[in-house]
Amino acid sequence: MLLGSAVIVSTKETYAANIVKGDTTANIKAVQTRLLNWGYYTGKVDGIWGSKTLSAVKYFQRRNGLVADGIVGPATEAAMGLNLSKSTSSGNNSASLNLLARCVYAEARGEPYVGQVAVAAVVLNRVKSSSFPNTVSGVIYQPGAFTCVNDGQINLTPNQTAYNAARDALNGYDPTGGCLYYYNPATATSKWIWSLKVTLKVGRHNFALGQ
């Protein structure tokens, strides 16, 4: 659980360099545009990998005899007639993604998918806040911030769901609306964390903006 907030996990999943769910905004827009034109997608072409885009990709995959995993891998990319470019975005670099996925897995495995994305979003919201370190690793390893670091669960290997949740958060999906804290009310012992106003509850976690 969150002492101040989240968890991470590394992944051993390997993907072709140019097509993991559309690593860049340009790639995501290309996927969205193609799916919109073909009637699989009804959202905005905004370059954000949110739930609507994910659902549209899975729908396309099911209708075209592909594995409906939501990942724009080589087969899906070819079926869409796309040639996506390799990501050069520092925000989505593999080190940050892997660490964030480890955090999600350690802190929120077994939680609803939106709750796993929310945990990743809290980490990224802290990166953006002047009150916390300005890197994913800095936030996660900030002394006393996360119990998963203290108890070693940060070193567990994440599953694909955690990996997907981390990537969705990195691509701008934030179901918390900017929350900086979360905790499990069944296990939280900090009096201070209980003083925060809860703005969202997902699964076993409460999410709060801060004071």
Image (spheres, rainbow, N blue to C red):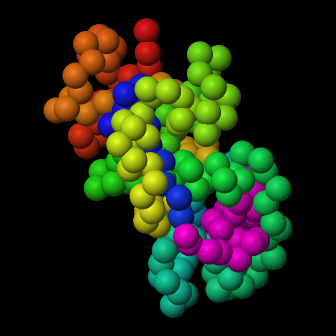
Q: Residue at x 22, y 22 (%)?
A: 189
Q: Residue at x 50, y 27 (%)?
A: 143
* Vertical placement of residue 45 versus 150, above or below: below
> Quadrant of the rendered structure where residue 107 is?
top left
* Vertical placement of residue 93 versus 146, above or below: below
Q: Is residue 92 visible?
A: yes
Residue 196 falls left or right of residue 18: left
Q: Residue at x 45, y 28 (%)?
A: 145
Q: Residue at x 29, y 36 (%)?
A: 205
Q: Is residue 51 magenta?
A: no
Residue extending furthest toward the left: 186
* Vertical placement of residue 185 versus 137, above or below: above
Closer-to-camera residue (171/158): 158
Q: What x and y, as percent, mark residue 91?
A: 72, 45
Closer-to-camera residue (40/76): 76
Q: Which residues are magenta?
A: 12-36
Instruction: Give the tally of numbered discs.
Output: 0
Q: What x and y, as percent, mark residue 182?
A: 37, 30
Name the quadrant of the N terminus.
Answer: top left
Q: What x and y, as percent, mark residue 131?
A: 59, 16
Q: Is residue 45 visible?
A: no
Name the quadrant of the C terminus.
Answer: top left
* Vertical placement of residue 207 versus 108, above or below: above
Q: What x and y, as percent, mark residue 59?
A: 49, 74
